[in-house]
Image (tube, helix red, strand yellow):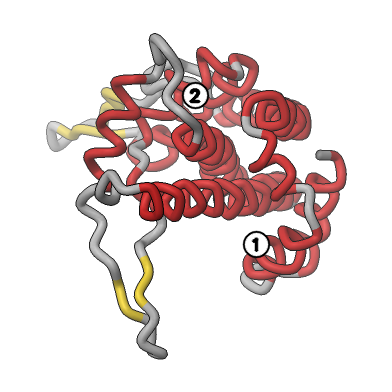
Amino acid sequence: MPDETSPQIEKFVEQLQSSSALTFARSLFHAAEGKELFDQAVVFASAVSTYYSLFHLGGALMLAYCSGPVPPDDPHASARTRLEKQWRTLQPRTLSNGVRYLPDPGERIPHKYVPPFLQREVPEIFQSLGQRDKRGTLWDMREFVSYAPRMVSNGHINVRYSGCQYEPQDFKSHLSQHLSRIDQSFCSAAGWLKQHHNEVYLSIVSGDFILFEFAELRSYHPPSVVKRAWALYRAV
């Protein structure tokens, strides 16, 4: 966080809100990519993209939350304090034109911070994202993709000893259920923003969001993914 002076605080609040909108856009494209990969039967990659979609969606809400005034008896006081401590370490960087800027505060949100926040604020999104080692949730499925199954050999036989919780059809079935709910997750997130942080909601549904955040990310994806991301955004 910047020093406790009004102009610096105001500028950092704007940065948190801007980061929230960009993170929301990032989430849209991860969701679209997850859908596209699933339809192409690239199931493991789809699970990773779908996980990151809901992780970034939760991150967007956390950034919006931290941009607002601290409520009495803040239910997220511990996470806010830890994040603010991280943000105080951000060092300004200099663009090629000499303009100085702070790095994106969204990159300092750890994965473990998002599920507890969603569990309290938007529980239907939390149910899909889940927590580590909760079978059938996207976090557990992403861990399975990255690290499982593991094997040990005694020289004669190979034995799977961890990460065996999903058979192929079981994994695909769980992922299909999460993808079927993802459109509603975005609507729920937008509704939460509109109720609690309307200034961020208005930014996301503005023309500037389409011209800047959405347009910036669309250049990294094929037209089929962009079309899906646009459909998700239209639903919001």
> Which residue has dot 2 on it?
166
- Please, what secondary structure does the residue beneath circle 2 have? loop
* Residue 134 drawn at (x, y percent): 43, 16
State the residue at coordinates (41%, 33%): 144
- Please, what secondary structure does the residue beneath circle 1 have? helix
Which amino acid is tagged 1?
Answer: Glu
State the residue at coordinates (80%, 53%): 228
Task: Quadrant for residue 224, please give it.
Answer: bottom right
- Would residue 42 be visible to someone looking at this image? no
**On screen, 145 above or below 71?**
below
- Would residue 48 be visible to someone looking at this image? yes
* Residue 190 drawn at (x, y percent): 72, 33
Which amino acid is tagged 2?
Answer: Tyr
Residue with the most extreme left position: 154
State the residue at coordinates (37%, 23%): 132
Q: Residues within 10 Å of mark 1 (few under 14, many from 20)?
A: some
Q: Residues within 10 Å of mark 2 (few under 14, many from 20)?
A: some
Task: Quadrant for residue 206, please give it.
Answer: bottom right
Marks 1 and 2 sit apart, C-alpha to C-alpha, by 37 Å
* Residue 176 drawn at (x, y percent): 70, 30
Along the line of sight, which residue is nearer the eye, 130 or 177?
Answer: 130
Q: Is residue 72 left or right of residue 91?
A: right
What mark, if any, has residue 32 been given in the picture? Answer: none
Q: Is residue 214 left or right of residue 83?
A: right
Residue with the most extreme top position: 73
**On screen, 149 above or below 87?**
above
Tell me which numbered mark, 1 or 2, is placed earlier along the sequence: 2
Q: Is residue 97 left or right of residue 215?
A: left
**On screen, 229 above or below 176?**
below
> Which residue has dot 1 on it?
213
Q: Quadrant of the C terminus?
A: top right
Q: Is residue 204 left or right of residue 151?
A: right
